[in-house]
Structure formats: C-alpha cells, structure tokens
Image: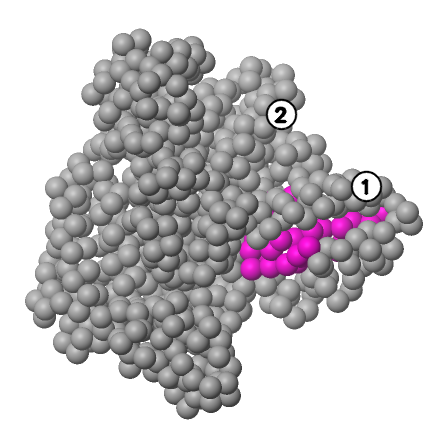
Amino acid sequence: MCGVNMGCVCDIKKSVDEMIERVGSSVEMAIPLLQAVQSKFRYIPKEAIEHIASKTEMTETKLYGVATFYSQFRLEPVGETIIRVCHGTACHVAGAEGVTEALEKRMGIKDGETTADGKYTLESVACLGCCSLAPVVSVDGEIHAKVDRGSAVELIEEREKA
Amino acid sequence: MKNKGLKIAVGMSTCNMAAGSRKLLERLEKESLDAELSTMGCLGMCHAEPQIRVTDADGRESLYCAVNPAKLERIIKEHLRGGSPVEAWLFNANEGDGAALLTKQQRIVLRNCGRINPESIDEYLANDGYKALEMVLKQNNPSEVCETVLRSGLRGRGGAGFPTGLKWKFALKERRDKKYVICNADEGDPGAFMDRSTLESDPHAVLEGMTIQAFSTGANEGYIYCRAEYPLAVAHLKRAIAQSEERGFLGDNILGSTFSFHLHIKEGAGAFVCGEETALMASIEGERGMPRLRPPFPAQSGLFGKPTTINNVETLASVPWIIRHGAEKYAAIGTEKSKGTKVFALAGKIKRGGLVEVPMGITIREVVEEIGGGTGTHRKVKAVQMGGPSGGCIPADLLDTRIDYDEINRTGAIMGSGGMIVLDETTCMVDVARYFLGFTQLESCGKCTFCRIGTRRMLEILTRICAGDGVPEDIDELEELAVQIKNTSLCGLGQTAPNPVLTTLKYFRKEYEEHINDKKCRAGKCVNLCSYEISEACTGCTVCAHKCPVGAISGERKGQHKIDQEKCVRCGVCRDVCKFDAVKVI
C-alpha cells in the first residue's frame, strides 16, 4: 500500500494511463492531466507524477514546476471535507479573518492544515465571486453566505451531528 | 388545480445558490404543479437573493426576492395554486428601492442575465441570439466588422481599456496560416464577479461574441480560459458549446458559410498572474504562468507563436449588441473617450450589493449612493476601492468622479475589471493596503526581483505598522519601494501592485501617521492599537454580550453594559451587532 485511500501504486498507474488516454499526452496538457489526477485522488501522489513522466515527453521536473506554480494543486493528501474561507476584498472587510480564526480554534488546526482524524482541511481562497453575500465559506463546494464566527463553527457542528 | 400555464424560474446562479435557492427548486419540483419549471441566472440583485420569477398564463410577470422556504409555502398556496400573486412581496421596478436600483442602469452586457434560462439555447435564440453572427457572416467582410467595433468606441473591459476594434485590426492584418482567439475568463480580482455571472447566466452571448471575434480576426480556433473557482460557469459553457455545435453556430462551415471555428475550454489552476495575457497563453501551453516581454505582442506572436487576439468576457458579451444595434448607438452612450456601459460588482458596506451596469459618465456617487443605496447603516462611506489589487481607494470627497477610464486614472485608482468595494469608517485603510499587498505578494510569479521581494518588504512594513510596531521612516520606505517596483516589473501585476498603498497614502496619510506615532487605529481594526468601550447610548439589549466570542461583556438587561478589557480580543463583533451605535473605539 502506498498510503493512498484509492489503493496502491498499480491502481494509480492504471488510473493515470486512462487519463493520458482521455486527456492527451502533449506538453500543453500538463495542467489538464494534473487536474484529472487531483480530481480522482484529491491530491497529486508522487507516483502519479512519476508515471506521467515515464509515459509522456514531460519530465518530472516540468510536472513539479507546474504543480507547485498553481495554487489549485496539492502534493499532500487532504481531509474528507474541504472548508474554504473566502478572503476576497469584500469578505476581508466583512470579517473573513475572524471566520478563519474561529474555525482554526474550533478545529484545532491552522489555516492550510488537515485535522488529525483526516476529516477536515481548512483553506483560504482568494475570491469565490459571491462578494455581495460576504463573508462566504465553501464546504465541499457548497457556498454558505453571510457567515460569521458563530455560524461558521455551526457549519462544522451540524456536519458532526449528521 | 386552478392556476394553469404558469412558468416558474428559480435563480440558480452561484450567488442564488449560496443564498439558498436549491432548497426552493427542490421544493417546487415536489409540488407537481401544472407549470413549466426552469432556472435562471443572476439578475444582479445579490442583496435580495434567492429570486423566483412567476409568469402567469396571461404573461404577467411577478418577481419574488429574498424568498425563503416559509415564504415559498405562501407563494405556492396563494399564487401558484390560487392564482393571486402575493402583492406585498412583489419586486416593484417602478417605485421605491426597485426604481432607485434600476432607473440609472442600462443593460447591454447583462441584457439576458436573469431573464433567460442559461441552459437553453432556444431561449437565447428567442432573444435575438446569434442574429449578430448571422449578420456578420452574411456581409462576409471581416475588416468591416473591425471598423464597426472600432467606431463603437468599445475598450477592453478587463481593465487596460485598449480599443477592441484596433486590437482586432492588428490581428486581421497578419497574413499567417493559423490564428487564435482567446476569451480571458480568469477573473482574478478579489471583489469582481461580473464575468462569473455573465458566463453562468448568459454563456451564449460570450460564445457569439467570440465567434464574431474569430471571424473578424481571421482565426479558426479559440480558447476560453476560465477560473477553476467557477465550476458552474465552466459547466454552462460546456453545455452551451455543445448546443452551438449541434445547431451549426460553431464548428465547420458555420451557418452554411465558408467560415469554420472550433472552441475549447481551458480551466485555470489558481494563479492570479494568469489574467495577464502573456502569462495566460503560457498557461494554455501547459507552462508555469509567467509573463514575457512585449513586443512581440500577441497580435503578432501569441499562443503557440501564432497571431492571437485576447478579449475579456464583458468585452465579448458587448459585441453582439453592438453589431445588432450599430456602432453609433453604442458610441452615443458614455463620455468622449469612454463609450458604452460598464458592469460593476458592488460589494462591501453597501445596502444593495450586486451587479450593476451603468452608462459610462455617471458618477461613482450615483452608483454607490443612488443605485446601491449607500452603506445601509448610520455610517458614512469612507472610500470606494476600485480596480482590485491593481487599483486604489477613492476617498468619499472624490465620489463625484465620473466613470471614465481617464478620470478614474487621475485619482490613482483604475477602472479595472469593475470591482467596487464600498468602505466605511469601520475599515482601516492601512489594513486594506496590507490586505492587497498580502495578495499581490502571494500571487507574484517571482520572475522580477522587485515584484517578488519588493512586495514582500512592503507587506512586512505594513504588517508591522498594523501590529503597532511602525516607525516614522516606514512611510518613506514604502514610497521608495513603490516607485522601484512600478519601474522594474515586467507585467501589470508588479507595475500596479503598489497602487493600493500609494492611494491610501495619498488620501489617508493621517491614518498611517496615527498608527505609527499615536499607536492608534481609529477604525478599530488593528487589535494592538485600539480598545472598545460601551457608551451611555447602550440600552441593555444584551445582544453584544450574547455575541461576544470570549464572554468579555457583562451587564444587566436594560442596563449599560461593560467590556472587560482583560478578556476582550478586539474582534469588533459587539460594534457590528449593536443597533444603537453604543460601542465606541477608543
């Protein structure tokens, strides 16, 4: 086992082969390929990069160069639920820092970290584009409007109960 | 079942869904009404979402705003089943708030947003969709289209304001076997969401604009580079492209002509700098999104080394309207050098936040105070932040500045992509500058030394000032760094990164000095530099005591409350929730 929930190295290789087949293997497909990997594994396993490099004309260096440039890509596993606190301008002036602070306190982790039980990852994002409903928080892609310190913590607590 | 032949449209844009529209749609789906149930995009009234529009069999339209599950039950009972609209809840465009919101707006880009179902090409076609493309293909004269767009006065809405027609002419002039067009939908400015809304609510308008862009510049392949943070926009675009291909508006021999055009979507991967055109092209090519020197300009050597025309979403969505109505009609709107309309994303301390589209030439005050209704609280507008991280803060006494590229530039801010964040006295201007530098510092691609390291030094100084450790030399150092970063950066990101600091220093220098010399933050934002006190205006309503996250507020019901300064973390929640303006910053 390689520590990935999805299975072991051979599973990763098989999935990556399918992705190369579907997306393409030319250099311009570096980003879509890494996006496909991340969408399946929720992060980019080292083995996936190695396998892409062995099957295409892209080198590991090139792939790591791209993967570390763009903020979307993660090289470490993430929690089951991803909580994203928007820190756009409108959210900032409406108290997004307080929301992150309250969530950090409730979850016992810092911004960007994953809880020890692997349940939650807390992230900051630049802007989700819902500025008139600021501050907003996205829980697994579902956006919650006009959140404050209290209601942000409630979002987690409701999930815990359910 | 009394009421038949109804049409019900539920707002299902990202903002509507954030406000809870999905539950409403699910509830309506269960109700088994004899009605056509569909969805619509964003009307721009984000302050009053979610929205539902009911069209009765006789054509009467009723728009319900800020609908919640309880309200919906009554709408179902009285209107959808009973046939009589709930009059008290109807949005009225002719008087009161509704009139204030709409009278000064003029919708060209947002013409269909919230009016049609964005997932239906037929609804787009029923609203003059693809007519402009038909006209253009019938006349079959690309250079004439470039001239029309040039005469209309349309300038790039992504922020730089370059004349669109001229850009197209440059690309058309190139005699090469292969050319590309790109739609820049990498809306990265925090605080701007007009492109998201347009793509989600009227994707075909952008596709039509792009197809005309390709025809007029001699391109036969195009890319839409869309932010990954906008999944719904991507989904709607994909569907729209498939529909257009099926109906012959995209693909080979469009509408029976000799013109062929193929379109791809590329999803961004989260890099603000990719909004810069050369970085964006590098990203499409599968590289790290780093800008390169111009010239050569994209019109000569762009994507894969071929002539490329890049336009922003809002620019492209304006094109079909211009073709259909004529350049003169568009040019009649606006000021001498800024023609047409501009969409603004109104947010921050504003009563009616959302998307507004106004003719160029009206004042910022009209947008903020009349259309947006001011702050909506007893607090006054302190400044308006325009242009995101590349822009600046325009102080309240300059609100009569007109919406015009050159007039806004003179204030030190920029038109930018159209984010307009209203700030009131609870906003610390040094903190706003720190916020933007934090953003640009993080997003700098690292290619230019001053942008990479200079923004970091500026951020450190601003963080120090906000923490109460500022020293008098800090202001001079900020100004010196600002000039160096502007002069030595390759692309727009670095060249404009110091703007938020420069404009706040220009108009709010006193606040910097108070932070540094008096160790005081008058806005009550910088926790080391302020404390809160409850004044005699306190009515003892207990709301602040309940809301205080650290239990620092005590007091009897109906008696004046008190803050325990030892426990207080200065988060400002008490001031935000107090309805009597009793919480003061000292």
Which residue is denoted by mark 1 in the rendering? B32
Q: Secondary structure at mark 2?
A: helix
Q: Amino acid at mark 1?
A: Ser
Residue B265 rendering spot, x and y as whole percentages: 46, 27
Screen quadrant of the N terminus of chain A: top left
Front in this rendered view, residue B561 or B464: B561
Which chain is disc 2 placed on? B
Q: Is residue B240 visible?
A: yes
* Residue at (51% x, 60% y) in the render: B353
In x, y percent, where is residue B86? 78, 62
Q: Amino acid at mark 2?
A: Gln
Q: What residue does disc 2 label?
A: B243
The reply to whether label 2 and label 1 mark residues of one chain is yes
Of the two numbered discs 2 and 1 on the same chain, state the one appearing first in sequence. Answer: 1
Does residue B43 sit above or below B249 in this rendering? below
- Write down the region rendered in magenta: B40-69
